[in-house]
Image (tube, helix red, strand yellow):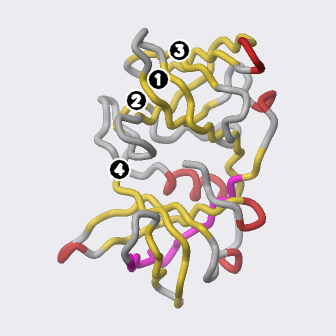
Amino acid sequence: MATIVAAAASLVAGGAMAQAPAAPSVVRGTVTAMDASSLTVKGEKGGVIKVALAPTWTVAVMKPVEPDAIKPGSFIGTAEMPQKDGTGKSLEVHVFPPGVKMGEGHYGWDKKPGSMMTNGTVGTVVAGKKGSRQLEVNYTYGKRTITVPKNVPIVQIAGGARTQVKPGIPVFMVVQKGAGGQLTAGSVSIGENGKKPPM
């Protein structure tokens, strides 16, 4: 459990604040090389990115789950697109382990132009049209109504092993920028069985 909590914490590092937090810096891509203290990643948008790994770095595995995993009381994160009526439409949903609440709030994201990230506790869950679900997501300074379309990826965050991170594996990392522009990650998120993380 401690490993899962650490992985979840690093996944949203920089997001947990009382007020609306700034969008964290993220790296998405495929590992091309690694050593004991760093990863080299071919970015999704091109270019090669080197990321230093914190000494205590952890691995978070995104395991696909059924929509029923999203229940009242679940703490989730969802990249979503704001709609004209003030609601959101999910691009993906990640369900945190029981008792873990990280990155709570509603803030900018870069999954798509104009997308946002909403992390909060699920209130009501209502079945919608064509297999969709409508969620009320509550966070410390507000709440949002978010529709999760039928085919949107839904994953559960679980702890993984460092040996699962290797060249050829797609990864997602929240990174901190240090002096000289050095990027450092405290956790590396991967999909189950080498799949691309949906965040």
Left-right relation of 114 to 35: left
Residue 67 is one of the magenta-drawn residues? no
- State the residue position of label 4: 24
Secondary structure mostly seen in the magenta stretch: strand
Which of the two marks, 3 or 2, is nearer to us in this view? 3
Asked whether the residues under the numbered discs 2 and 4 touch, taking CB atoms below 8 Å apart as contact, a structural biologist would say no
What's the distance in space between the residues labelled 1 and 3, CA to CA? 12 Å
Q: Residues within 10 Å of mark 4 (few under 14, many from 20)?
A: some
Instruction: Say which element carries label 4.
Output: loop
Which of the two marks, 4 or 1, is nearer to us in this view? 4
Q: Earlier in the sequence, mark 4 or mark 1?
A: 4
Q: Earlier in the sequence, mark 1 or mark 3?
A: 1
Identity, as a three-letter code, of the amino acid under mark 3: Thr
What's the distance in space between the residues labelled 4 and 1, CA to CA? 18 Å
Left-right relation of 45 to 191: left
Q: Residues within 10 Å of mark 1 (few under 14, many from 20)?
A: some
Q: Earlier in the sequence, mark 3 or mark 2?
A: 2
